[in-house]
Image (cartoon, rainbow, N blue to C red):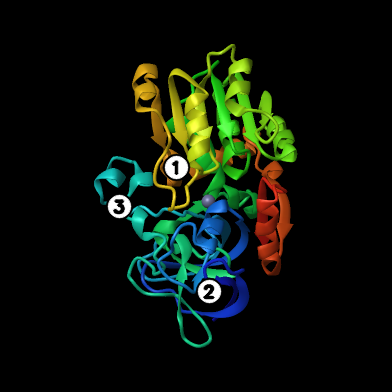
């Protein structure tokens, strides 16, 4: 069958919208008609070559939701008509991390940017017969996609798919970093550097566990205004104020108990470290471009202040449990999802969506199919 997709042919060049050939679902495959896909910064890193992908052409997009059309042999718990959120990290269910419930650390992790499906084959091809890779095994920027059953989470049909898609990456990634990885305790102080799709959900996580002070930092005043509506108690525009000095002022020179870096730059990770109180936790959530290979942090300070520096992938969560949980919280009014969507685009407008992301115009832009 045919599908219209946004295809990345060359590093640094805009995606081309074109018709691809989609094969029939093979064993363990699920054919999904996409309803919505979120525009996450990680796709942009892949698009411009900040983070290498295994091949091109490739269909990017790793935050999506849709409706199951057809399933292959060996898929018995997912049916046509099911509503699904795509998961950008599948879990093999067999490695030591999956067995321990830490599916975010599954051995399949390093394979997801290579292009082919887990069986080594391709489901998308150009008109000329070229193999087309699927970023994160998903390729969500396509009207239809074929994914492995391990990449799919069936959800409640009452949840609008347009908001459900956000839970596939940004919401789990941010909320989970705050709640699962950092384990923010009630009454503590929190700094979030980068008030975008991940950072806003770190703020939501901090609100969930009753942090008393939540400082949001960003370059864009509009994003800082949005962060207040999600629960930030203080904001810092890093282009106008010195971030570390301002945090020290706000916290009576103590620093925050938890600092999150959701921008992906070594110097902001160092700022997060410097703005953290003794015995505090620094959580790096953004995926840095691969040409950054070190963080300028004083080893002596690390010891003297006894701070913990940690990373977090996929909210350090088991997404198959976390996605339905967060959607249930949404239904109960305990987290905001509708408000995360600041602009919607057609597939044809996807490159504009990324320009808007870079210009600070979005918490999340969403492609509607
Ligand atoms: Zn993402
Ligand atoms: Zn595994």
The residue wearing badge 3 is 107
Residue 86 vs residue 143: left or right?
left
Circle 3 Cα neighbour tier, 10 Å, few/some/many (<14 / 14–19 / ≥20):
some
> Please, what secondary structure does the residue beneath circle 1 have?
helix
Cβ–Cβ under 8 Å for marks 1 and 3: no
Name the residue nearer the viewer: 8 or 21. Answer: 8
Give the mark nearest the N terminus, 1 or 2.
2
The residue wearing badge 2 is 9
Circle 2 Cα neighbour tier, 10 Å, few/some/many (<14 / 14–19 / ≥20):
some
Whether the residue carrying mark 2 lies under 8 Å from ligand 1 is answered with no
Residue 41 in picture, x, y percent from top left: 57, 52
Dot in front, 1 or 2: 2
Whether the residue carrying mark 1 lies under 8 Å from ligand 2 is answered with no
Whether the residue carrying mark 3 lies under 8 Å from ligand 2 is answered with yes
Residue 80 visible in the displayed image: yes
The residue wearing badge 1 is 321
Residue 369 in picture, x, y percent from top left: 66, 65
Dot in front, 3 or 2: 2
- Residue at horizontal 53%, vertical 18%? 255
Name the residue nearer the viewer: 74 or 208. Answer: 208
Q: Quadrant of residue 247?
A: top right
Residue 137 vs residue 32: left or right?
left
- Residue at horizontal 61%, vertical 74%? 16
Q: How many marks?
A: 3
> Please, what secondary structure does the residue beneath circle 2 have?
loop
Circle 1 Cα neighbour tier, 10 Å, few/some/many (<14 / 14–19 / ≥20):
few
């Amino acid at each position: 069958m045919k599908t219209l997709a946004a295809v990345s042919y060359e590093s640094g060049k805009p995606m081309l919208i074109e018709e691809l050939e989609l094969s029939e679902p093979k064993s363990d495959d699920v054919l999904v008609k996409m309803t919505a896909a979120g525009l996450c910064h990680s796709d942009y890193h892949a698009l411009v070559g900040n983070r290498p992908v295994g091949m091109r052409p490739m269909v990017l997009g790793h935050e999506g939701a849709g409706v199951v059309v057809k399933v292959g042999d060996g898929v018995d718990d997912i049916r046509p008509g099911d509503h699904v959120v795509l998961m950008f990290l599948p879990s093999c269910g067999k490695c030591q991390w999956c067995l321990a419930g830490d599916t975010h650390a599954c051995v399949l992790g390093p394979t997801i940017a290579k292009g082919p499906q887990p069986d080594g084959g391709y489901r998308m091809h150009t008109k000329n017969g070229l193999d087309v890779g699927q970023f994160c095994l998903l390729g969500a920027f396509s009207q239809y996609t074929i994914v492995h059953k391990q990449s799919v989470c069936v959800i409640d049909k009452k949840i609008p798919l347009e908001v459900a898609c956000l839970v596939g990456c940004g919401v789990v990634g941010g909320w989970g970093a705050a709640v699962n990885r950092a384990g923010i305790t009630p009454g503590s102080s929190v700094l979030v550097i980068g008030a975008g799709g991940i950072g806003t959900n770190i703020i939501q996580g901090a609100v969930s566990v009753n942090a008393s002070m939540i400082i949001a930092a960003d370059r864009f005043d509009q994003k800082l205004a949005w962060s207040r509506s999600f629960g930030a108690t203080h904001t810092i525009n890093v282009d106008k104020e010195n971030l570390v000095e301002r945090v020290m002022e706000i916290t009576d020179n103590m620093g925050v108990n938890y600092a999150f870096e959701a921008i992906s730059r070594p110097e902001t990770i160092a700022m997060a470290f410097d703005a953290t109180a003794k015995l505090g936790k620094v959580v790096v959530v953004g995926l840095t471009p691969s040409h950054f290979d070190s963080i300028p942090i004083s080893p002596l300070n690390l010891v003297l202040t006894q701070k913990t520096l940690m990373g977090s992938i996929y909210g350090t969560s088991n997404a198959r449990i976390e996605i339905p949980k967060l959607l249930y919280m949404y239904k109960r009014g305990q987290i905001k999802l509708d408000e995360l969507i600041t602009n919607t685009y057609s597939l044809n407008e996807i490159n504009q969506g990324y320009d808007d992301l870079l210009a600070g115009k979005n918490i999340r832009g969403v492609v509607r199919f």
